[in-house]
Amino acid sequence: SLTLSFKIGLVATAAATALGTLVAFALGRYRFRGRSGTNLLIFMPMATPEVVMGSSLLTLFINLAIPLGFWTILIAHIMFLISFVVVTVKARVAGLDPRLEQAAMDLYANESTTFWRITFPLVLPGIVAGALLAFSLSFDDFIITNFNSGSNVTFPMFVWGSAQPRPDDLPAVAAALLACEGVSYNLLAGQSHGALNATGRRRLGVGVGAVGLAAVPLL
């Protein structure tokens, strides 16, 4: 499970960082038709509850007859990680001083050289921050993964399953609670007033407690 979580986290982070960086440059540097709608679509996965997003992706995979497994988890993680990368890198792109690139162009640097020597090093801290954020969110995700994992078990799912009570303990606990209830009723029967007489209430309490105690070894 730990290996699977690392593998999904690394691949999803790489894909989301690459796609998110391209989208961030497009939204931060250019004006085009549909830019406002694209910004809205980018923010929607961040504002949508994970239960809604996980169930929506599960419905999509079922309608497309895609078997649940490693690839569905990977696609689901990339889908919601892109938004976080775009927001992080876009903030860095918006803070760049365009005069630095203009100075490089004045010194006869072409567009490719300007990008790799000036723009990319300035944006790199934002890209690294977005990648680290994406990996931590992917490695830690449980709800979306649980919807689309199929038979695969990631590390958060393993931890959640380990924290659940074992099924073998539940019958014994239920029988013990039933026995305690019977004993408590027996103790209070002598002080209660109702339709049953005291002897009838004591017998009822003893009977309930005996049933619970007898059920413990059988379960």
Image (cartoon, rainbow, N blue to C red):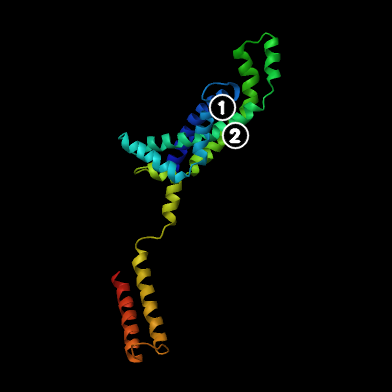
Q: Which residue is mark 1?
A: 24
Residue 136 lies, in percent from the top left, at 53, 40
Front residue (pair 42, 155): 42
Q: Residue at x 59, y 30 (%)?
A: 89
First reached walking from the N terminus: tag 2 or tag 1: 1
Residue farthest to the top, as pictured? 108
Q: Which residue is mark 2?
A: 129
Task: Specify the label residue 160 is tagged with.
Answer: none
Q: Quadrant of the C terminus?
A: bottom left
Question: Gap between marks 2 and 1, in whole Å?
Answer: 14 Å
Q: Secondary structure at mark 2?
A: helix
* Quarter of image, res 167: bottom left
- Residue 1 appears anywhere in the view: no
* Quarter of image, res 67: top left
Amino acid type for the residue under numbered disc 1: Ala
Camera-side mark, 2 or 1: 1
Count of picture labels: 2
Front residue (pair 97, 6): 97
- Residue 208 appears anywhere in the view: yes
Front residue (pair 177, 22): 22
Look at the picture and state if 139 lies above or below 184. above
Report the side of 160 relative to 172 (left or right): right
Report the side of 47 relative to 111 (left or right): left
Amino acid type for the residue under numbered disc 2: Ala
Q: Residue at x 56, y 27 (%)?
A: 24
Residue 1 lies, in percent from the top left, at 42, 44
